[in-house]
Amino acid sequence: MELELQEIRVRTLKREEEDDARDALALGHYLGDCAPAYRRVYQAAEYRGEIVGVLLWDQCVQRNRARDEYIGWSDEARTIHCAQVLNNKRFCIAPKHKGTANLGSRILGLAIKDLPDAWYERYGEDVLMCETYVDPKLYDGTSYKAAGWQEIGLSAGYEVKNKETGRKEKTHPKKVFIKELREDGKELLCLPYRFPAGAGRAHARLDFSKLDLALLRKRLSELPDYRRMQGQRYELASLFSSVLLAHMVGYSTSQAIGDWLSGISIEFRQALGFRKRAPSEVTIRRFLCRLDVKNFEQIVYGWLEEQTRGLPKEQCNVVSFDGKVLRGTKKGNEPAKQLISAVLAPIGVTIAQAEVSCKTNEIPVAQHELLPALSLAGKVAVADALHAQKKTADEIVVKKKPIFSSVLRIIRAT
């Protein structure tokens, strides 16, 4: 049966559908299915309701010289960005369709278009590049080449245990293919930091018209202006607002913020307080270097809390505070950074935050820095058992007067 390739569709399988995909790989792929991975996605290629191909993606191998040299990865960059490269672990076409011309490249092309969104929705990670390994003794990788993948070298092979002899044997090298999903993918993978997940996606989904930008500028105008008169081309509140909104949609560097401001409409720039021209990258960088972070944070958190006042009470009456270690902040012998945050739990809005020094812990930081900045009247305060302290209970129950559980009242009484 000839297939109309234009009618091929590729979709990501739901978890309850993955057993069928495993069975298909076990029967149709020369390696069968593979061991369960922490993160994986199955895709099915369908033609008029019939599955004609199955793909399996999981995270890339930790080390591969050909790939690492192609990207220009240092050990540090590999550690930071490894999760943004996926491995096409299995690709299987249904036996009765294996001779169909251009079917493999068609499926791969459609799969690559669907993969970034599917992976982001499931795991919250952006995918910048894909890799795969082809056994040259069995295949030439023609479908990958036709789909725009680039052959970059050979793997070194790896050791496996022979089930019959029990000895370790080294596999023969395989061809390494790479597919970049963004033109600047290699550059992004070599940065010493990772862009926020969803950068470039969230902008399309964030409706700024629902935010009170005039109130934001009014609150930010309360911050002192450190600049000389000749350096005040742009209002300080406008620069503050731009940096905040750019961060909310995932742009965190001065260059990215400048590009974002240049790309928004004139009307939007005017709402932020700019007349015609947006500030340059240099202006934004100088501004960021002299930013009073602590005062800026206090005003922003207060403004964010004000934005919730029109919401139903059940969406913003629970405040949860807890500490978390920031992933990717450990450098050498220096410990990773830890923050303790207060969050309006039902909607996930942070309303206060403080850094926990390596010489202390969450408890005194919560008592002396976090709680004094909070307004808990009429709210339910929630924390884990670590904060079941008499002093913490006094700070919350006596001074903040929340609608609170009886647990801290008992602690305070004892």
Image (cartoon, rainbow, N blue to C red):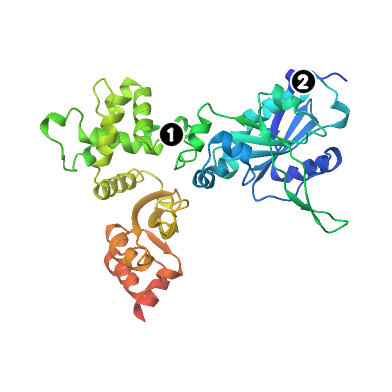
Judge whether residue 128 can be spotted in this image. Answer: no
Q: Residue at x 43, y 70 (%)?
A: 386
Q: Nearer the viewer, residue 195 or 201?
A: 195
Q: Nearer the viewer, residue 131 or 290?
A: 131
Q: Which residue is mark 2?
A: 102
Judge whether residue 301 can be spotted in this image. Answer: yes
- Tell me if residue 390 comes above or below residue 375 in the rendering: below
Q: Quarter of the image for the N terminus: give it.
A: top right
Considering the numbered disc 2 on the image, is that residue within a helix, a strand or a loop? loop
Q: Which residue is mark 1?
A: 206
Q: For marks 1 and 2, give the one nearer the viewer.
A: 2
Q: Residue 265, percent across and down?
A: 35, 21
Considering the numbered disc 1 on the image, is that residue within a helix, a strand or a loop? loop
Q: Residue 130, percent across and down?
A: 63, 35
Dot 1 or dot 2: first in sequence order is: 2
Amino acid at the residue labelled 1: Leu
Where on the picture, by quarter, is residue 258?
Answer: top left
Amino acid at the residue labelled 2: Asn
Where on the picture, by quarter, is residue 359?
Answer: bottom left
Q: Is residue 51 left or right of residue 404?
A: right
Q: Residue at x 45, y 66 (%)?
A: 384
- Number of marks in picture: 2
Cα separation, mark 1 vs mark 2, equals 40 Å
